[in-house]
Amino acid sequence: MQERERIRNFCIIAHIDHGKSTLADRILELTKAIGKEKMREQFLDSMELERERGITIKAKAVRLNFGDYILNLIDTPGHVDFSYEVAKSLKATEGAILLVDATQGVEAQTVANFYLALESDLRILPVINKIDLPQADIERTSSQLKEIFGFKEEEISLVSAKEGRGVKELLERMIKEIPSPSGNFQGPLKAFVFDSTYDVYKGVILFVRVFDGEIRAGDEIVLLQSKRNYKVEELGVFTPQPVKKEILSSGEVGYLCCHIKHPQEVNIPDTITSCNSLATPLLGYKRMPPMVFCGIFPNFPKDYELLRQALEKLHLQDPSFSYEPDNLGSLGYGFRCGFLGLLHMEITEERLEREFGLNLIITSPNVKYRVKVKDGKIFDVETPHRLPPSHSIEEIEEPFVKVSILTPLDSMESICELAKSRRGDFVKMDYLGKDRLNIIFELPLSEIIVDFYDKIKSVTRGYGSLDYEFIGYKKTEIVKVDILFNRDIVEAFSFLTHKDKAYEKAKEAVLKLKKIIPRQIFEVNIQAAIGSKIIASQRIPPLRKNVTAKCYGGDITRKRKLWEKQKEGKKKLKQIGKVSVPKEAFLEILRMEK
């Protein structure tokens, strides 16, 4: 048997919390890739944030030996914000294990990931997990897999990833049913770059799947997107620790180092080929455009260059977020960044602070609006301070998404009310089995980015799930709400919202700021305004010193003179004093509910 015929490249795809990382743990144990003394839960989730939150953020590739076979496993995230990681994994494999929780059944990301794998023409193995739990409903979950996806009863495997039951049989079935990689050993080199990371000593490390030909240490290669030539200094595989090899052949998954020192030289996805080859690029995966935008600014202006370098290195590992220089008068120089969702934004912020030691300020999240001005020009607006004056705007369009909500039958009314309160339009409803519904709405993206998923979980008692896709722009009525401290606009707190919700959001914003901002030695008036019209306000009284403490008796006019003098001083301070705004205020406005 040729080595390539012994290779099986596969990934594990599922909804969040359905047990992907636990199943990967059992596979690592079964193949003896990790000794018992080194084994820990969620072994492949090596990032501190992943272990804290109990979610997978980055896809992980690992090479395993199972009998005479070589298994290249890629563990993927389940949250909708990290679906681009799933798309990268599918491109590098021939098969996918579709994992479903026996207690939860088929959920939104189960459906989304199934169709992603189907579009990639992968062999899909349906697997029901958590069969050891007393609340597991195997019959119901099996029925859903058959009704929704058309699987047959004999195609469905049952496992308990926690206890390891059925895992060996699953691997044996996978070897029989997932095809070995195809490709041309003798043809020109074609390798797909599906991920990368940065090492301070080795520079950029590329994660690759070789489709045609082979790569050897010392070879001259070219990255087709950047048209740059490099020499391969080191290559190897993850077992899961990096192990050097002299050659990576057609069908294999591994890594290579070319001493690429600058992260911006690499674009993901990309195709590697030989310098003298006329090979065409491999088709990449579908890139998802950023959906949520916010400003990221260093708390200390001197850290601007450190923030730029950190964003470059992080962008190498996560090309799905965008960034460009920005400037806000109140916060100085920083970057305007785009993300796939709010969780994606929070994770990126935490990684910047933990991995690079930065102290950051994050502005309120916004979506990208499309603005047409009266002279006919059309441009995108991602931040409130870029919105032109209202008198020059002809119309504004906002992004809409098609939202699929999987919910128990008894929560249908609550879900419909929630969607209606977020300006949603009902599209259709499908029954999934006897007790579950898939309800589809069209909603403005701005209405779902903050707390919509949490609300769904709340009204469905944890059984609801969400998936969405961008469908285009529609005409809307958006206004800019400015926040003023003592009549000075603080751009970092400005936000864009639908005119029907402007008053409620403005009132909530100023009330929160009043609670958070500490009292100053002068009075602080917090106001929310649309243009020149004040729509909400709060007052923070000044700290007062008892200037008449030493006055004992005597004429009252003496005390009045001291009070008047103090009042004049406070008035002058109010005009020239700078309001001290703690970081917590920015975070609270960021998390402000709609």
Image: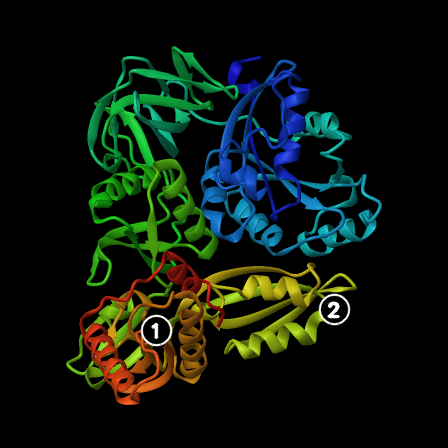
Q: Residue at x 28, y 66 (%)?
A: 579
Residue 248 seen from this side: yes
Residue lying at 37% horizontally and 65% vertically, measured from the top left = 367
The answer for how far apart the CA atoms under marks 2 and 1 are is 69 Å
Residue type, mark 2 in image: Leu
Q: Quadrant of residue 73?
A: top right
Q: Residues within 10 Å of mark 1 (few under 14, many from 20)?
A: few
Camera-nearest residue between 589 and 38: 589
Q: Amino acid at mark 1?
A: Ala
Quadrant, the N terminus: top right
User: 5 or 169, which is in the foreground?
Assistant: 169
Residue 200's label in the rendered image is none
Q: Nearer the viewer, mark 2 or mark 1?
A: 1
In the rendered view, tell whether residue 81 sits above or below residue 425.
above
Q: Which mark is residue 409?
A: 2
Horizontally, residue 537 falls left or right of residue 28, namely: left
Q: Identify the element where label 2 is drawn.
A: helix
Q: Which residue is mark 1?
A: 549
